[in-house]
Image: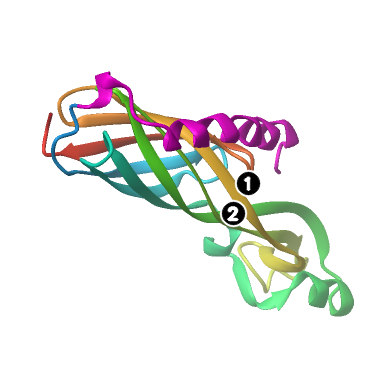
């Protein structure tokens, strides 16, 4: 479930970070003399723990880059063996006597951002993307003909929604070829964490 304060935190720091991206880079960042490419793992904890990111930093205007990522919920009920794709929660409620157990949300997001180096070991980024939420409900079939030992998941189509995801954060140099990533995102309200390889090494 989205935590509103996390979304407000992301939006609150977006304006100054965007300003940082647009102003000239400080002298300490002027060591970006060649194009660098980064790629690696990224997650939006605790909701989207499977993801990949890639970015390119160009040696123009003191260094400016483009970032892209895709993240999803690897534990989504829609991926479980007891998910019933031929049923929806609305159909179960209307036609079956099965007992309702619980509800869970599952998210995925796709994002783009601009990167600005501030120091040789520090870059900031800000951007936005598309986030989609699906809602699932679990039921129990007393006859045990559906699901696993009677327990099964279905999609609740009434809970499907999409929104703009605002994201801000930083890339911290850990070694000549490793960057750590930290940030916040507004949808589903989460903290960005990641680790990427930077080539060529600096």
Q: Position of residue 147 (x, y in %)?
A: 63, 67
Residue visible at 67% across and 37% down? 7
SS assignment for the magenta stretch, majority: helix
* Vertical side of 59 occupied by 142: above or below: below
Q: Is residue 103 left or right of residue 20?
A: right
Residue visible at 26% across and 25% down? 29
Q: Which mark is residue 187?
A: 1
Q: Which residue is mark 2?
A: 107
Q: Is residue 183 visible?
A: no
Quarter in which the C terminus is drawn: top left
* Marks 1 and 2 close (CB-CB < 8 Å): yes
- Please identify the quarter of the rendering in which residue 120 is found: top left
Q: Position of residue 75 (x, y in %)?
A: 52, 51
Which of marks 2 and 1 precedes in the sequence?
A: 2
Q: Is residue 84 left or right of residue 142?
A: left
- Please identify the quarter of the rendering in which residue 186 is found: top right
Secondary structure beneath dot 1 equals loop
Q: What range of the chain is rendered magenta? A: 1-30
Q: Is residue 66 left or right of residue 169?
A: left
Can residue 29 be found in the magenta stretch? yes
Q: Position of residue 108 (x, y in %)?
A: 54, 56
- Please identify the quarter of the rendering in which residue 88 is found: bottom right
Can residue 191 be found in the magenta stretch? no
Q: Which of the pair 14/53 is nearer the observer?
A: 14
Residue visible at 52% across and 46% down? 48
Q: Neighbour class for label 2 at 10 Å: few (<14), some, many (≥20)?
A: many
Secondary structure beneath dot 2 equals strand
Quarter in which the N terminus is drawn: top right
* Vertical side of 150 occupied by 167: above or below: above
Q: Position of residue 152 (x, y in %)?
A: 67, 64
């Amino acid at each position: 479930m989205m935590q509103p304060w996390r979304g407000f935190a992301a939006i609150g720091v977006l304006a100054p970070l965007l300003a940082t991206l647009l102003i000239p880079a400080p002298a300490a960042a002027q060591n970006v003399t060649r194009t660098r490419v980064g790629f690696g793992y990224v997650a939006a904890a605790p909701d989207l723990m499977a993801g990949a990111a890639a970015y390119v930093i160009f040696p123009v205007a003191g260094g400016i880059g483009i970032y892209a990522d895709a993240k999803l919920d690897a534990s989504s009920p829609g991926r479980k063996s007891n998910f019933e794709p031929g049923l929806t929660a609305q159909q179960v409620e209307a036609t079956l006597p099965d007992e309702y157990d619980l509800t869970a949300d599952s998210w995925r997001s796709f994002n783009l951002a601009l990167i600005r180096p501030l120091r040789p070991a520090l870059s900031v980024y800000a951007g936005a993307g598309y986030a989609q939420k699906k809602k699932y409900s679990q039921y129990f079939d007393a006859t045990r003909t559906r699901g696993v030992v009677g327990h099964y998941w279905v999609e609740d189509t009434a809970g499907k929604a999409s929104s703009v995801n605002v994201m801000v954060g930083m890339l911290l140099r850990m070694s000549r070829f490793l960057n750590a990533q930290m940030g916040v995102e507004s949808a589903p309200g989460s903290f960005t964490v990641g680790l990427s390889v930077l080539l060529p090494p600096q």
